[in-house]
Amino acid sequence: MKRILFLFLVLTICIPPVFGEEKPNAIDLPKEGYYIITYKNYSVNLEINVNGYDVRDGSSNEDSSGQADINYWITPGKNKIKIRLADRKEKQKDNEGLSKEAEVKLVLGQKGQFPDEGIPLKHFQWPSQTQTNLGEWTELEFEPPFSPPSKLWKQAEPISLTKEKESSAIEFAAEFTKTLNTKDPKKILSMIQFRAQDTSEVRYYPYVETDELKSINDMTKAIGSSWKLDTKNIKFALLCNNQILSITDQKGEPIINSKKGASIPLYLSWINGKWVIVR
């Protein structure tokens, strides 16, 4: 249940010459594992983007530290991490006299490891190592030593956003919302099966259909038929070499929500002439 709920519900350029690149080629790199972003920021806002996916949106005015598994968003070939720092205008007086610092690391970890035990691949540390101006993007480009297992990148076609494509994506979202409200686990699973199976591969655990159906059934019992689609002020964004379409509102929030406070992010790919939920 925890696994499917994690997947299914969301409750709540200028490149500087120096940015502390790690040299992982000096050691024998593993052929599988987890690409993990770790970050911390003090007295400055931090925004992190991986291949178009927002790891942090930069809106928080609070100091923070955390980590994110980004296997979902790693593509074959070159990948890009974009980082931007910004002043906290609303808290400038509170921050006077405090040092402004930010650090972002990309590490390759293994199951059971803490992130700081992983192999470092990229390192951004401001202001001690990385020279960048507040408000400007810093781009770290890297080619992963291996691609996380996924069928997506070979099947998904590059998307060219047109009015017709946007309209068909909203029609698909409406169909998905209607299916959610049937509370039929088999019908719901049929629309998220690619995502469920591909997630199993990306995160190295077995796909068991009976477990997925049980988890969906538990979810429908908790939420019922209260899902609604909000089509006002929709924002479309292309991620991962234009192979994934993200659909949100203008604030970056999901457009499928329930009265119980749950929401579902919508990441679609165009596969064999139709939209498929992939992330």
Image (tube, rainbow, N blue to C red):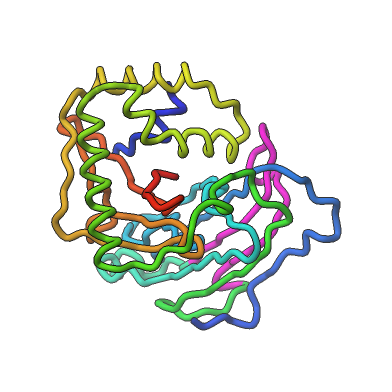
Q: Quadrant of residue 134?
A: bottom left
Question: Observer-nearest residue: 39 or 157?
Answer: 157
Give how far across and how far down residue 126 sits, in percent: 55, 70
Q: Is residue 59 above or below residue 132?
A: above
Asked whether residue 187 appears in the rendered view, the answer is yes
Q: On the rendered image, what quadrant is the C terminus found in? A: top left
Asked whether residue 46 appears in the rendered view, the answer is no
Q: Quadrant of residue 175?
A: top left
Question: Observer-nearest residue: 206 or 27?
Answer: 206
Magenta-span inclusion, residue 55? no
Q: Which residues are magenta?
A: 101-128
Number of marks: 0
Q: Is residue 139 left or right of residue 10?
A: right
Outermost residue toward the front? Answer: 273
Q: Is residue 178 above or below residue 145?
A: above
Could you tell me which residue is drawn at 62 percent across and 34 percent down?
Answer: 204
Give how far across and how far down residue 186 sits, in percent: 35, 22
